Amino acid sequence: MKLFKKALSIALAMTLVFSLAACGSKNNNNGTNTGSTGEATATPEATATPEATDNSGSDTYEIALITDIGTIDDKSFNQGSWEGVEAYAKENNKTYKYYKPTEKSDEAYLTSIDLAVKAGAKLIVCPGYLFEVPVHTAQTKYPDVKFIILDGVPHAGDYVADIAANSYSIFYAEQEAGFLAGYAIVKEGNTKLGFMGGIAVPAVIRYGYGFVQGAEYAAKELGLAAGSVDVKYTYVGNFDATPDNQAKAASWYNEGTEVIFACGGAVGNSVMKAAEAAGAKVIGVDVDQSSESDTVITSSMKNLKKSVYDALATYYGDAFPGGTSVTLDATTEGVELPMETSKFTKFTAEDYAAIYDKVVKKEVTILNDTTAVDSEGAAIKDASGLPVESVKVDVVK
């Protein structure tokens, strides 16, 4: 997940830093979502000192989570990560606490990390790319403390990955998550689809690539004719909830689009509002967004809870994979659809288990090359160049 610096650095950055996937959630606590896709538009008022919450009745807390400024019940990256911390700590009788920085800044994040270390933290979980520079500083300052960063990789502000032996970086295979969503929604009987991304960073691109390929795979299984599935495809250029984004989504619904996969941080909020007015559907992203709106039929998810839980287990099992970066995919249950809360009427749990098994066994090929270029050497940032037949991709500027 990264976007800057020269040729090789940009490629590395784009792959690692801006694995910035796609989308946030409506944050009822006015927090921010800084997983792979972007940020929510509102931020809470800063408090005088970083907030720390005791959940274990101890004076020292060996596991800590630093929020990105939002709260642990933000229905997004903070909450998903905290649930992993809480589950492991309770099952294994570990002390744990979360810290809420006073503001969105490297200095505030480092202050919260300092407080966590002073309170006895041996392992600190940092959800989101905003922690890349702070963790880079902290991993040197506190060599005996372990750091887990989600959807980000430590760097010194130059977007060149630098993962110390006490840090572990976790990314997710967005193309597989997108594939599952595209497959399910076509199997559900929808053929007029939309993909509304925020900014064309690699993670968002991978979600879109996977979505179109999943729709194609389902269409082939159903025997649909060439061009039977129509996908409107765009990047709105921001990660915000705006009247323009809502109006664009509304126009798509008015033109017959049945479901929009919203991959752009708070852009999802705008799409949900448009869907509510149109009586249409939305596919959420990154986390289970079913509680955000009745229009959310399913969500293309990263399994944050499990990935944090498993990472904590490696530490306590003396197998912490420090100095490395991993991309979690279906083989590790790193991506999924939340079938228990999805509102499908035709696509069944058996259907899901069957396609998931194929993805795990690599029986389906899912392209995810975000560095592809066209015949003129220009970067291909949408799914229009994918080798699909049943799906027609209509790129909307």
Image: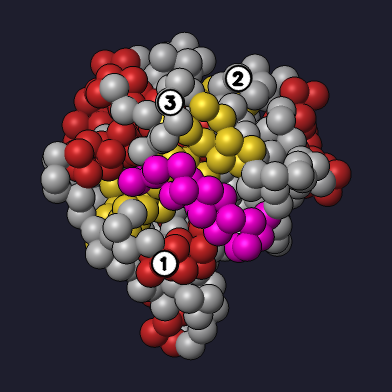
Q: Is residue 107 magenta?
A: yes
CA distance separating discs 2 and 1: 40 Å
Which image quarter holds the C terminus? bottom right
Q: Is residue 200 left or right of residue 242?
A: left
- The reply, left or right, for residue 287 in relation to residue 92 is right
Question: What residue is shown at x 22% (from left), y 44% (from top)?
Answer: 315
Image x and y of residue 374, in percent: 45, 78
**Counting residues from the N terminus, which is met first, the one under dot 1 or under dot 3?**
3
The amino acid type of the residue labelled 1 equals Lys
Q: Residue at x 33, y 46 (%)?
A: 122
Residue at the far top: name it: 345
Q: Residue 207 carries which label?
A: none
User: Few, some or many C-alpha atoms within 10 Å of disc 1 (few <14, some 14-19, many ≥20)?
Assistant: few
Residue neighbourhood size for the residue with mark 3, other residues' Cα within 10 Å, grouped as few (<14), some (14–19), many (≥20): few
Return the residue at label 2: 291
Let me know if residue 102 is in the magenta part: no
Residue located farthest toward the front when viewing the structure as drawn: 59
Say which mark, if any, is on residue 58.
3
Vertical comparison of 75 with 345: above or below: below
Predominant SS of the magenta segment: helix
Segment colored magenta = 104-123
Residue at mark 3 to residue at mark 2: CA–CA distance: 33 Å
Q: Mark 3: which amino acid? A: Ser
* Closer-to-camera residue (228/26): 26
Q: Is residue 206 left or right of residue 335?
A: right
Between discs 3 and 2, the one toward the N terminus: 3
- Disc 2 marks a residue whose amino acid type is Ser
